[in-house]
């Protein structure tokens, strides 16, 4: 089924540019890409294929696996192969979870589920072959595979592979096809670095941010400077795209993430957590099934609010909540306030056990533009938060980098900064 959809793209766009590798300067038409992939196709189904990297060989490996009807499990550079058994023939794709909220697992998908995710993303975001995609994020990660690889192979949307996410590499890659409008999916950390370096190409027409919380201040600053609307996108490895902010102006409420993609139904469960139902929801965790993912439904640990008109608000994660003197606090609410301070570049908030006292102490880890002390931030937060929600422990770092997938792990920072404490499980 996946190979058939690819062949349809080749038939209708044979001589159109499909792929450009900025590192080598080489172009491929859809026909040339198909011929290169067919030259290495195995005679029949093999074991699991593990496409790796962020170049043309990754794309060719995917196409060869589709042609030979072999399942694939994309890997990022340096990622070890998971020890997993061969799935049944109906399961064609395995995604590895990030592992930031627990042990790393695989999510298995059928071909119709992958196609449904790509169709929903392309239709909701208005992606089109007229606006090629700039490939900066990992092709192996669920975000990159759904927003770059599948639109190329199933919808004929050309892809320009950028050799580096550094600001200096973005402009030359964006100008390869002249002034044609481009789609650029990235994570907030990259959007911040490009914005501060004044490196966002003028021909970017669709700007997408996913993988981590998009600060409203960054979204607003970028819009005021360039007029470019940064569209917030919420997805999950288990179900692909969930919600998208298709509005034309910056958000006001940092909790707002958009509305459900076309064909996706979202619901707030009795415990306040997000439930997703759609044809794109994965089949199962592989090889160990769990009730959170079954029957076309994915049950997340994300706590949400849902307005009558379908606006989706991300409140926090149930397993990240901090217990403060008998009350529960979503760390995201504190982070949102701290990010409002003009000198805070990034922050992360979590709880640690308080010896001899009830509950936990709130910890704030800050990356600031300049010298900034706890007194100034505490006073700033007190104007906007109840006293019991103010952090008691402050850590200031020169850099608070996200992982390659654009995510921050509270457990990771808790272990690194407080190694003598038992890690809080999630």
Image: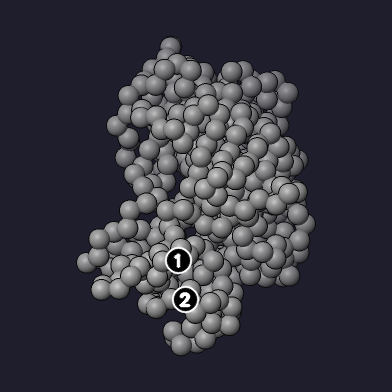
Q: Is residue 361 left or right of residue 245?
A: left
Judged from the image, the secondary structure of the residue bearing numbered disc 2 is: helix
Residue furthest to the front in view is: 326
The residue at the point 71 percent across, 37 percent down is 262
Q: Circle 1 is placed at which residue position?
A: 327
In-front residue for pair 341/255: 255
**Can residue 364 be spotted in the picture?**
yes
The residue at the point 30 percent across, 64 percent down is 416
The residue at the point 64 percent across, 46 percent down is 243
Discs 1, 2 touching: Cβ within 8 Å: yes
Residue furthest to the top in view is: 43
Residue 317 image point, x, y percent = 48, 54
In primary-sequence order, the first of circles 1 and 2 is 1
Q: Which mark is residue 86?
A: none
* Structural distance between the alpha carbons of marks 1 and 2: 9 Å
Quadrant in the picture for the N terminus: top right
Residue furthest to the left in view is: 420
Judged from the image, the secondary structure of the residue bearing numbered disc 1 is: strand
Identify the image quadrant of residue 199: bottom right
Residue 213 image point, x, y percent = 55, 59
Q: How is the image coloured?
A: one colour
Above or below, 386 relative to 129: below
In-front residue for pair 194/292: 292
Residue 225 image point, x, y percent = 72, 70
Q: Circle 2 is placed at which residue position?
A: 388
The residue at the point 72 percent across, 59 percent down is 229
Q: Is residue 217 left or right of residue 389?
A: right
Badge 2 density bin: few <14, some 14–19, many ≥20, Cα 10 Å: some
Residue 414 image point, x, y percent = 33, 64
């Amino acid at each position: 089924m996946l190979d058939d959809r690819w062949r349809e793209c080749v038939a209708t766009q044979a001589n159109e540019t499909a792929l450009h590798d900025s590192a080598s300067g080489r172009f491929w038409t859809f026909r040339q890409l198909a011929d290169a992939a067919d030259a290495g196709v195995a005679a029949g189904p093999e074991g699991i294929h593990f496409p790796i990297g962020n170049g043309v060989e990754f794309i060719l490996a995917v196409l060869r696996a589709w042609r030979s009807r072999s399942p694939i499990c994309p890997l990022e550079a340096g990622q070890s192969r998971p020890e997993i058994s061969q799935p049944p023939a109906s399961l064609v794709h395995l995604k590895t979870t990030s592992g930031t909220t627990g042990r790393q697992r695989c999510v298995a998908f059928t071909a119709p589920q992958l196609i449904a995710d790509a169709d929903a993303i392309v239709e909701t975001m208005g992606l089109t072959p007229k606006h090629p995609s700039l490939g900066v994020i990992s092709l192996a990660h669920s975000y990159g595979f759904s927003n770059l690889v599948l639109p190329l192979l199933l919808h004929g949307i050309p892809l320009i592979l950028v050799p580096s996410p550094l600001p200096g590499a973005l402009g030359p890659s964006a100008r390869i096809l002249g002034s044609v409008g481009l789609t650029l999916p990235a994570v907030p950390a990259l959007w911040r670095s490009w914005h501060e370096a004044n490196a966002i190409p003028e021909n970017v027409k669709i700007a997408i941010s996913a993988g981590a919380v998009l600060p409203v201040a960054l979204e607003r600053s970028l819009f005021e400077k360039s007029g470019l609307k940064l569209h917030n996108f919420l997805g999950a490895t288990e179900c692909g795209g969930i919600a998208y902010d298709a509005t034309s102006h910056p958000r006001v409420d940092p909790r707002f993430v958009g509305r459900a993609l076309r064909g996706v139904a979202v619901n707030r469960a009795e415990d306040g957590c997000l439930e997703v139902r759609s044809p794109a929801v994965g089949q199962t965790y592989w090889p160990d099934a769990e009730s959170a993912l079954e029957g076309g439904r994915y049950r997340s640990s994300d706590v949400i609010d849902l307005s009558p008109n379908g606006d989706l608000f991300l409140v926090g994660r149930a397993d990240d909540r901090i217990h403060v003197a008998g009350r529960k606090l979503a760390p995201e609410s504190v982070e949102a306030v701290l990010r409002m301070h003009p000198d805070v570049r990034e922050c992360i908030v979590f709880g640690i056990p308080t010896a001899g006292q009830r509950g936990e102490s709130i910890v704030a880890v800050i990356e600031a533009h300049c010298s900034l002390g706890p007194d100034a931030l505490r006073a700033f937060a007190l104007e906007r938060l109840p006293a019991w929600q103010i952090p008691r422990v402050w850590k200031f770092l020169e850099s608070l980098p996200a992982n390659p997938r654009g995510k921050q792990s509270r457990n990771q920072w808790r272990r690194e900064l407080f190694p003598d404490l038992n890690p809080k499980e999630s």
